[in-house]
Image (cartoon, rainbow, N blue to C red):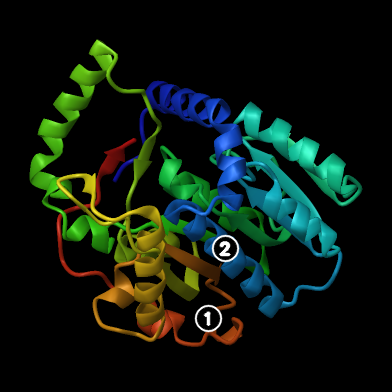
Amino acid sequence: MTDLRPEFAAAYQRQTDAYFTARSRYWKNLYEDISLYGTIHQERRAIALAWISELAPPQASHILEVGCGAGLLAVELARRGYIVTAIDSSEGMVELALAHAAEAGVHERLTVSISDAHALPFPTASYDLVIALGVIPWLHSPAAALTEMARVVKPDGFVLFNSDNRFRLNHVIDPWFTPVLAPLKQVAKRIALKLGYAERGAPNHYYSYTTLERLLADVGLVITRCRALGFGPFSLFGRQLLPEAVSVGVHRRLQDLADRGTPVLRSTGAQHIILASRSESGPAQAVSQGPEIARSCGPAPAGPRDRPARG
C-alpha cells in the first residue's frame, strides 16, 4: 500500500469529492434509514458517542471531525458543550453541515469548512479528540491523513476512526469477492461504464486489523480500544440472499455473538471502530476497555495483501 503520485492523487480526490457531493442527501438520510446499511451506520455513530461519553472530556474541549459529512455528529457534540471544528472535502457535504448547524443553533461552538484530510490546516497538538468516521476507506493516502491526525491531536488526546475490514465475513464466504476474480471484475466494470450500464463511484479500500496497527504505529499512535461492527449483506456471487428486514435481524444476532467474543465473528465484522492514543501516553491511560481490544478486533486470518475495491 503506497501513496499515489500527486497527479493521480488529485484525480482520485476529484472523483471522490464529486461522488459525495452528488450523493450528499443520500448520506444524510442514511442515518434515519431502516435498511441494513443504515442500521450499521446508526450503530457506529451510537458507539462513537458512547465512547466519547466514557472518555468524559471536559466541556469546552476542542474536537476536530475530519469528514464531517452532513454534520450530524458534529452538531450533537456541539450541543454537548464541546468546541467543534468540522471539515469535509466535499462542497455538498459542507453545505448540508452548515445548514444543520444553523438549524440547531450551535454555530457559536461549531465551525464548518472545506479542507483536505491529507493536509490539515491546524496547529500541532491543538485538539483533545480527532474523529474520522467513514473517512479512511475513501482516502488515496491514509498514512498521510493519519499522520496529520496524530500531529494535531494533543499528547494526551485520542483519535477515533473506523476502517472497512479486509476480512469481513460476508466477503469471505462469497466466491464473488475472491481476489482471483478482481482483474476480471475490473475489466467488466470498465466495459459497463463505457456502455452506460454502470455509474462511476468512488474508490474505496479495505484494510486488515494488522495493517491498521502498522499504519498507526508508523505515525506514533497505538490502539486503545477496538470493536468489529456489521455483518452482511450476505450474498452469493454478488446477489443479495436475504430481504432487508431479515438481513438486519441476522446482523444483530451475529453482532451480539461477536461482542461476546465468539471466534471468527469477533474479527470479521464489516468494519473496525478504533480509538487510538499517542504512543507516549499509551493504552494504559485509555478508558475502561471492556472486551473490545482483547476479543473483537484481534488479528485477522492470514490472507491476500490488502488492495483497493472499486466502488
User: Which residue of the protein is positioned furthest toward the left in this rendering?
Assistant: 180
**Residue 265 position within the rendered picture, expressed as x and y whole percent measured from the top left:** 29, 75
Residue 126 visible to an observer of this rendering: no
The C terminus lies in quadrant: top left
Q: Earlier in the sequence, mark 1 or mark 2?
A: 2
Q: Badge 2, how many Cα within 10 Å: few under 14, some, many 20+?
A: many
Q: To which residue does mark 2 refer? A: 160
Q: Secondary structure at mark 1?
A: helix
Q: Secondary structure at mark 2?
A: strand
What amino acid is labelled 1 in the image?
Pro
> Which one is in front, 11 or 240?
240
What residue is rendered at 28% in x and 73% in y?
299
What amino acid is labelled 2 in the image?
Leu
**Residue 139 position within the rendered picture, expressed as x and y whole percent measured from the top left:** 44, 41
What residue is rendered at 42% in x and 21% in y?
11
CA separation, marks 1 and 2? 14 Å
Residue 163 higher or lower than 105, as above or below = below
Left or right: 280 in relation to 99: left
The answer to whether mark 1 and mark 2 are in CB contact below 8 A is: no
Residue 297 higher or lower than 212, as above or below = below
What is the quadrant of residue 253 in the picture?
A: bottom left
**Residue 26 position within the rendered picture, expressed as x and y whole percent measured from the top left:** 55, 37
What residue is rendered at 74% in x and 77% in y?
56
Q: Which mark is residue 283?
A: 1
